Amino acid sequence: MNTPRLGFLLQGRWNAADARTGAVEVFRGAEALGAHTGWLAQHHFEAGRSPSPLVVLAAVAQATTRIGLGTATVMLPFENPVRLAEDAATVDLLSGGRLRLGLGSGFGLAYNATSARIDREFGVPGDDRGRHTERTLDRLLRLLRDRTVDADPTLSLQPAPGTLGRRLWRATSAPATARGAGRAGLGLLVSSNAKELDGRTDDSQLDLIHAHREGHADPGTEPPEVGVLRAVHIGDDHAALEARLAAEYRERIDAATAAGRLPAGLTDGACLDRLSVHRGSGARVADSLRAESTWPHTTELIVLFGGELTVNSVLHTLEEILIGLNA
């Protein structure tokens, strides 16, 4: 049976007590527990969330020795590809080659009026963000794989990126983009959200994973990796946990129902199931993760931590999942 490696993504907000050192402490503790990778999200103009994951990972690199350091994701429309390549290569050098650079267009299914205002602040027209993303990605790939500087062929990217160009990941909910990522040799980051919800989130994401594999055209090499993000909540009192999560996810459930992505009339538990929100004891969560249709295709299970973050709660959840998966 396929056994994905375990990673985590810090997407939520730090409380006041942990805001300065929380990420470093989580990465250090997760490394001690045996986690394979840790990932940081990028958020602009949001209190308690970082707009600069590479800067934070540079600090994490000095406090750890083994764990992979990932971004999930850097928003390409807002980035200058040369500066991003330089920063990423620098963090990779500082970490001894541990960076996983996850890339995306940003916002995804959550694009709204606030997203549009942030686009304008960065000078990105909303109707051009897709094309701008692809142009930035194309140039970034040339920089990290060939060290090619378009304006002057006598210049080369510094520091030398080594093998970083083979540790790039693309986040998308579009099969065509996933196919292109596979063709380019990029790993795939599969969100905890699904574009369509005819059934469970995992079932609806299989087409995305298959498209990614189809895009990989070189039969002599291993296909690019697939990282699947999943929300996990640990608790032994299942009824109390489900009631709390129904309240926490109410806004998302109502929005998905209003958009026709969830049918009306489902129980809260059925909605959480369709959204692939895994909950219960460590053993119960491990069983529900293994039952997902995406599990056989997953190389990296990335546990998503949203809401308010604390060091103890993140590490406790990771420890319980590891115990459950190894039982």
Image (cartoon, helix red, strand yellow):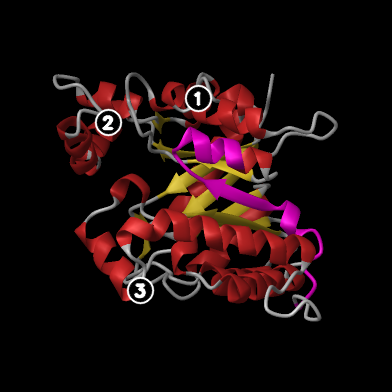
Q: Can see residue 56?
A: yes
Which residue sits furthest right?
A: 220
C-alpha span from label 3 to label 2: 42 Å
Foreground mark, 3 or 2? 3
In this rendering, position of residue 198 left or right of residue 104: left
Q: Which residues are magenta?
A: 158-180
> Residue 189, image x and y in percent?
54, 43
Position of residue 242 measured from the top left corner of the image (x, y, whole percent): 27, 31
Q: Where does residue 215 sit, x and y in percent of width and height? A: 65, 33
Q: Which mark is residue 123?
A: 3
**Element type where label 3 sits in the image:** loop
Residue matched to label 2: 242
Residue 241 spot, x, y in % from top left = 29, 34
Q: Is residue 167 magenta?
A: yes
Q: Quadrant of the C terminus?
A: top right
Residue placed at 48% from the left, 58% from the top?
133
Identity of the amino acid at label 1? Asp
Compared with residue 322, is residue 50 higher up or lower down, i.e. above or below?
below
**Three-letter amino acid code at disc 2?**
Glu
Q: Secondary structure at mark 1?
A: helix
Which residue lies under the disc numbered 1? 207
With 15 as the anchor, is 183 left or right in this view? right
Using the image as rendered, state which of residue 202 and residue 14 is in the foreground: 202
